[in-house]
Image (cartoon, grey):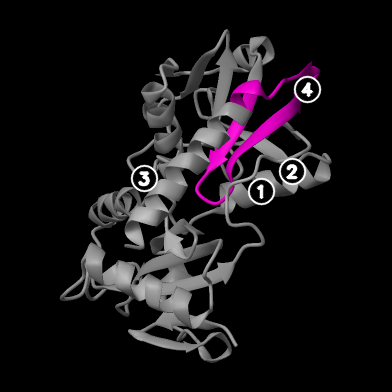
Amino acid sequence: MSYVFHRGEYVNENQAFITKDNRAFRFGDGFFETLRVMSGRVLFFENHFARITDCMAALHLEGSEGFSSEQLLTQIQGLLSRNNIHAGGRVRITFYRKSPGFYMPSSDEMGIFIEAEPLPQNEFELNPGGKSVDIFSDFKKDLNKLSIFKTLNSQLYIMSALYAREKNLDEALIQNNKLAIIESTSSNIFIVSNGVLYTPSIQDGCVAGTMRMNIINLALDNKIKVYECTLNPHNFLSADELFLTNAIRGIEWVVTYRTKRYLHEMSGKLIALLNESAMKYAGEKSL
């Protein structure tokens, strides 16, 4: 039996339900956060909570009385325990405005729905076969103050995933409305040229990923130069490596983009550093 956390309680996942006026269902009024678990502990929680509070402010959502990082982490760890997740796992938290109403809500109080499931591996593992990617050109991502958050309006990412499936690709690359490549269907992106990392700037509209930030910091701590900048298709064709990052899978290397083929030397180096950092974090938090 698996549990979820909903309406302040741990309930059987088959008994969880939403009402017809749930604003997440009716309007996509909210956002979500995914967190990686290692050795039964949530990784890099402080980074995630900072993004949660930033998104709450942007969407004018208000936490209920007592809402805090400590309370949320306790709720997550309680769910992990009930679902017997003591090694690797994945947590998704959906935050939504829980008041009734149409476009104008009656209040801004926030509801929380937490899911947790085990993963087959405890540590991050570099994908043995590189991914294939290409640009999704049917739709572009608009630049606005919500671009950097993972809101419940995910239609762009769904359409890009459908495009990747249609073209027999593993991921699709997404452009902003100025034609800069900013992210993939489910990940942030990095290219490597002459040992230097380049990743799209937040100002260009990519999601402000927690793993993106961790990789930037790991690289800088290990004397690897990193530049946040605008990237176009030509930059990808001239790069030595291309890899994707997200909170659950860590780092995934790309082998092909159009006619270009890539290596994965930097990806392998960084995922080793990431596992070292993550295991240290999980060990400290279990004390």
Label 1 sits on a secondary structure element that is helix
Q: CA distance from mark 4 to mark 3?
A: 30 Å
Label 3 sits on a secondary structure element that is loop
Residue at 55% in and 85% down: 13
Circles 4 and 3: CB atoms closer than 8 Å? no
Q: Amino acid at mark 4?
A: Arg
Residue placed most toward the observer, 255 or 27:
255
Based on the displayed image, in which of its 4 quarters is residue 175 positioned?
A: top right
2 or 4: tag closer to the N-terminus: 2
| Range shown magenta | 242-267
1 or 3: tag closer to the N-terminus: 3
Mark 1 crowd level (few <14, some 14–19, many ≥20, 10 Å Cα): some
Q: Position of residue 47 (x, y in %)?
A: 32, 48
Residue at 23% in and 54% down: 57
Q: Amino acid at mark 2?
A: Tyr
Q: Position of residue 137 (x, y in %)?
A: 66, 32
Q: Determine which residue is flagged by label 1.
A: 159
Mark 3 crowd level (few <14, some 14–19, many ≥20, 10 Å Cα): some
Q: Position of residue 171 (x, y in %)?
A: 70, 40
Whether residue 46 is visible, yes or no, is yes
Residue at 24% in and 63% down: 69
Circle 4 or circle 3, nearest the eye: 4
Q: Determine which residue is flagged by label 3.
A: 146
Q: CA distance from mark 1 to mark 4?
A: 20 Å
Label 2 sits on a secondary structure element that is helix
Q: Determine which residue is flagged by label 2.
A: 163
Residue placed most toward the observer, 29 or 75:
75
Circles 1 and 2: CB atoms closer than 8 Å? yes
Q: Amino acid at mark 1?
A: Met
Mark 4 crowd level (few <14, some 14–19, many ≥20, 10 Å Cα): few
